[in-house]
Image (cartoon, rainbow, N blue to C red):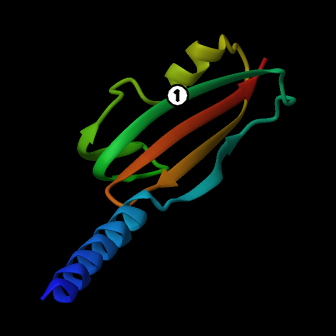
Amino acid sequence: MRKIKNKQRFSQYSILLCILLIALCNCTTTIPISATNNSIGEKEGISRTTVILGTVNTNNNLATGLIVSNSEFGVIEAVKNGKIELVSTVDMKIANYFFFKRVELIVNGH
């Protein structure tokens, strides 16, 4: 009887551990969004957000979902954060987790 309980407990912990590992696994991708004729500058501005149960789009509406943590997320916020006057490049870094995504817009310029 005791062996059966130990096996059941072990299998419950194994299932819980597998679910936890799947939830914490991620895949990070960085993609170029835009580039200009300006030379690459020394300044960098970053805008961050977290999207829960949603998508990230590289077109006009960047992040949509059940919960978006930063309503100001976008290129304008990244330019302000980096105090950039001339934009050179815009890249998007997306870290996909099981239920949510962490997104960064990285703007380089002068």
Q: Which residue is mark 1?
A: 47
Task: Count numbered badges in the picture.
Answer: 1
Q: Is residue 36 above or below residue 55?
A: above
Q: With 42 as the anchor, is 100 left or right in this view?
A: left
Q: Quadrant of the C terminus?
A: top right
Which of the 4 image quadrants contains residue 9? bottom left
Residue at 54% in and 38% down: 104
Instruction: Say which amino acid is labelled 1.
Output: Ser
Residue 4, percent across and down? 18, 88
Q: Is residue 16 above or below residue 58?
A: below
Residue 48, percent across and down? 49, 31
Residue at 63% in and 34% down: 106
> Callout 1 environment at 10 Å: few (<14), some (14 to 19), or many (20+)?
many
Residue 34, percent across and down? 66, 43
Q: Secondary structure at mark 1?
A: strand
Judged from this view, the residue extending furthest toward the left is 1
Judged from this view, the residue extending furthest toward the front is 2
Q: Quadrant of the N terminus?
A: bottom left
Q: Is residue 73 above or below residue 34?
A: above
Q: With 72 as the anchor, is 79 left or right in this view?
A: right
Residue 31, percent across and down? 64, 53
**Looking at the image, which is closer to me, 72 or 87?**
72
**Looking at the image, which is closer to me, 3 or 17?**
3
Q: With 38 as the anchor, is 105 left or right in this view?
A: left
